[in-house]
Structure formats: C-alpha cells, structure tokens
Image (cartoon, grey):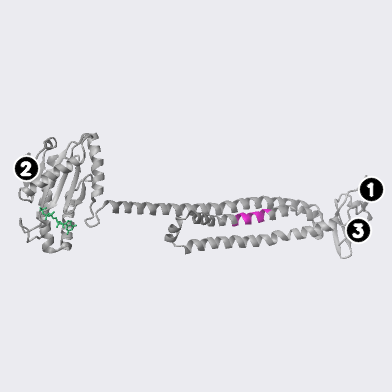
C-alpha cells in the first residue's frame, strides 16, 4: 500500500495523551506515531519522503524471512556434518587409521574432519546470531505499523515488549552461538585426544614387544647374545661404581653333538629348551640374567654375587638337571643330559674389559670338559692377573 497523499486530522481532547494514531484507509489500517504541536489538536501528515514507511514494511517482511530459511538450512548442515563425521569414525577401522598416520597430509585432513561439528556449529551460531539481530530489528516493523491490531490493543505495551524480546533474543542468540561453537569443538578435541592416547598406548606396547623380541632368543625364549653383551657392559660399570662383585656362570651341554646325531635336531632343540627352563628356574633373583651365549652354550650373569654364590648356583643347575633326568642313552657320561660349567667372579674395574669375566668362565668350562665333563670349575680372581694354560692355574672344581 502506498500513501502519498497529505492529510490533516483534528483529534478529540480525550486522545491527546496518546502517542500513536491508527489510520484506516480502505481495508488497511496502519499505526502512525504523532506529536501535537503547541497544544494544537491537529495532526498533519506530509509525505516528505513518499512511500518510505511502506518500503520499510516490505523490506522488513522480506528480511524476516532470512532467518526462517537460514535456521533450518544451518540445522540441516549441522546434522549432516555430525552424522558424516560419526559414520567416518565408525567405518574406518583402527588399523587403517594407524596406517594412514604415516601420511601427514591425510592426518591433517582427518583432524579437520573432526572439527567439522565445530564448523557446522559455527554456521548455525552465525545464523542464530543473525536471527537475533534481526529480531532486534523487530522494533523497526513495530514503528512501521506492521501489527496494527496488536498495537491498537497494546499501543503502549507492545513496543516495550518487542524491544525487551528483541534484546533477550539477541543475548540468547549470542549465548547460543558461543555454546554451539564451544561444545562441538570441545567434543572434537576430546575425541581426538582420546584417540591419540589410545594410539600412543598401542605404539608403546608394540615398541615394548619389539624390544623384547629383539632382545630374546627365538628358540629358547631367554635373552640373546646381543642382550647379554648390553647387560654385561651395564652391570660391569655398575659393579665397578658400587665396588660389588660380578659373577658369570657359563654352561655347556655335554656331548650335544652326539645328542643331535642320536635324536635329531628337533629333539636337540627341545633338549636345549628344557635346559634353558632349568636355568631360568635356578636363577630366581630379579637381577640375574639368563642368556644364550651361542650354540648350546648358555650363561647366567649374576650381579652382586661372589665366587661362592655363583658356584652354588652352578651346583643347583647340576642338581636340578639330575632331578629332571632328561634321557640321553647315547651319552658317554651317564644316561641323562648333563652339563659342564665354568664359573668366574670379579671385582670389576673400569679400565678392565668386561669380557675378561667371560674369558675366565670359559677357561673354567674348558677345564671342566678336560676333567671329564658333568662338573663345575670355578676360576678364582687371581686368574685375572695370572696368565698361561688353564690346567696350570688354580681351580676349584665340583662334580655333579
Ligand atoms: N639342535 C640344536 N643343536 C645345536 C644348536 N646350536 C648348536 N647345536 C649343536 O650343538 C653341538 C655342539 O657340539 P660341540 O661344540 O662339538 O660340543 P659337544 O658335542 O656338546 O661336545 P662337548 O661340548 O665337548 O661336550 C653341534 O652339533 C651343534 O650343531 C641348536 O640351536 N639346536
């Protein structure tokens, strides 16, 4: 409706306190604010800016449609983004995700995917803020006489109501916007953090398993040669620092070649495993290390143990093997599996090579073999200084 004509009204005295006037033209009524000048009872309307109030009404009506359209659209986008994200998380197996971690770019794009709810929330929040801001503009249509009937009923109450409602809508829109941004972002952050923690734990376990694998002998399940060398070096330096004795028990299965030739290599392997189990049981202290030194030779490294203690350990091995009585009918010694043992013990010094301990135990082992096998020869510390053939040196031997 366009109103271009000028008009003038004389008001009854009773309406002088009113601030708005309801003008009815044909079927349409509109709400017109007025001000009485100098006690006059006349109201003038001159369309200095023709059609302005009507333009405002049309514009506001259109503008008010925007949030109505935007709100469901953003809600839809929000929902789609969330369900897309969830289905992506469900359908992607963990293994696959771990493989993809190798590629930084993919990882980056994946982390972006997890923030999608945040982006969707942002979009929704912006729409709501816009909505709220436009509600604030509800004052404009009120002044543009959009609600003639209501204004007739609540001519003084309605503007206040619209104004308060608009402010409440605006503030709640802002709060909603902040909440909608923060909540999905926090959710995404937590999900990502939990995922990273799970992955870290898994990688730690895997790395531990790999370390164990690299340090142990595949057949016997005890430490391998490399691990023995590492621990020997470590314990040697520790013992030198703490001035504590370090002992080594070197064990070799007697006539193992004959065993293999008689029973075959598979049985030979089983026999090796059984001897390794005996050693594991015998070396009960947490600091002791049982390792495969090579072939059918095994060692027990014993920190903070002197020669007597190590010799007792060797004796225990003989006894336990005798108890097990692993059959070896072809043995030239007895009809069961036996071992020869060389024992050495030193007070380590930093300038002495740790392998001195091994060489000395090896001399003891050699002497035990020479003396008829199935026995232990402990090499006293003096041997470190002395040199010459093993047989010519002092030995402490014990048979099983
Ligand atoms: N089954 C099996 N045999 C092994 C393994 N490692 C080494 N051997 C065998 O152990 C035997 C060691 O033989 P030798 O070094 O001659 O010693 P021995 O026959 O035990 O004789 P003495 O040590 O003098 O009593 C060889 O036949 C090797 O093949 C293994 O992992 N499994």
Disc 3 from disc 2: Cα separation: 132 Å
Within 10 Å of the Cα at label 3, are there few (<14), some (14-19), or many (20+) other Cα atoms?
A: some
Q: Nearer the viewer, residue 87 or 12?
A: 87
> Could you tell me what secondary structure mostly forms the magenta stretch?
helix
For label 2, the SS is helix
Q: Residue furthest front?
A: 388
Image location of residue 259, percent across then percent down: 11, 60
Q: Is residue 122 magenta?
A: yes
Instruction: Please state the extent of the stretch shown in magenta in the rendering.
Output: 120-129
Q: Which residue is mark 2?
A: 391
Q: Which residue is mark 3?
A: 4
Within 10 Å of the Cα at label 2, are there few (<14), some (14-19), or many (20+) other Cα atoms?
A: few
Q: Is mark 1 within 8 Å of ligand 1?
A: no
Whichever of labels 3 and 2 marks the residue nearer the N terminus, that label is: 3
Within 10 Å of the Cα at label 1, are there few (<14), some (14-19), or many (20+) other Cα atoms?
A: few
Residue 145 seen in render: no
Q: Is residue 33 magenta?
A: no
Q: Is mark 3 within 8 Å of ligand 1?
A: no
Q: Which residue is mark 1?
A: 40
């Amino acid at each position: 409706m366009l109103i271009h004509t000028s008009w003038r009204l004389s008001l009854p005295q009773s309406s002088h306190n009113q601030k708005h006037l309801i003008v009815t033209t044909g079927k349409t009524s509109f709400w017109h604010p007025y001000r009485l000048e100098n006690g006059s009872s006349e109201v003038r309307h001159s369309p200095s800016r023709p059609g302005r109030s009507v333009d405002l009404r049309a514009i506001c009506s259109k503008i008010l449609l925007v949030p109505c359209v935007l709100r469901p659209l953003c809600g839809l986008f929000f929902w789609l983004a969330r369900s897309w994200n969830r289905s992506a998380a469900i359908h992607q197996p963990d293994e696959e995700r771990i493989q993809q971690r190798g590629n930084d770019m993919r990882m980056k794009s994946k982390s972006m995917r997890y923030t999608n709810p945040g982006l969707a929330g942002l979009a929704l929040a912006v729409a709501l803020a816009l909505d709220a801001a436009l509600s604030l503009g509800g004052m404009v249509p009120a002044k543009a006489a959009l609600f003639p009937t209501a204004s007739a009923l609540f001519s003084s109450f309605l503007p206040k109501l619209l104004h308060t409602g608009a402010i409440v809508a605006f503030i709640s829109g802002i709060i909603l916007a902040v909440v909608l941004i923060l909540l999905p972002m926090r959710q995404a952050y937590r999900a990502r953090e939990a995922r990273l923690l799970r992955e870290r734990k898994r990688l730690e376990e895997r790395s531990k398993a790999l370390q164990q694998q690299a340090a142990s002998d595949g057949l016997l399940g005890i430490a391998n040669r490399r691990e023995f060398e590492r621990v020997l070096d470590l314990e040697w330096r520790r013992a030198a620092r703490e001035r504590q004795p370090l002992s080594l028990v070197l064990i070799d299965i007697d006539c193992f070649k004959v065993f293999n030739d008689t029973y075959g290599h598979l049985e030979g392997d089983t026999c090796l495993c059984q001897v390794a189990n005996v050693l594991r049981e015998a070396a009960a202290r947490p600091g002791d290390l049982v390792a495969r030194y090579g072939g059918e030779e095994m060692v027990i490294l014993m920190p903070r143990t002197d020669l007597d203690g190590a010799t007792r350990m060797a004796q225990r091995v003989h006894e336990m093997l005798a108890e097990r009585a692993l059959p070896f009918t072809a043995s030239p010694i007895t009809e069961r599996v036996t071992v020869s043992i060389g024992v050495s013990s030193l007070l380590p010094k930093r300038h002495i090579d740790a392998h001195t301990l091994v060489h000395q135990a090896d001399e003891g082992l050699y002497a035990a073999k020479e003396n008829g096998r199935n026995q232990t020869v402990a090499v006293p510390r003096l041997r470190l200084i002395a040199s010459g053939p093993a047989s010519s040196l002092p030995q402490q031997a014990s048979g099983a």
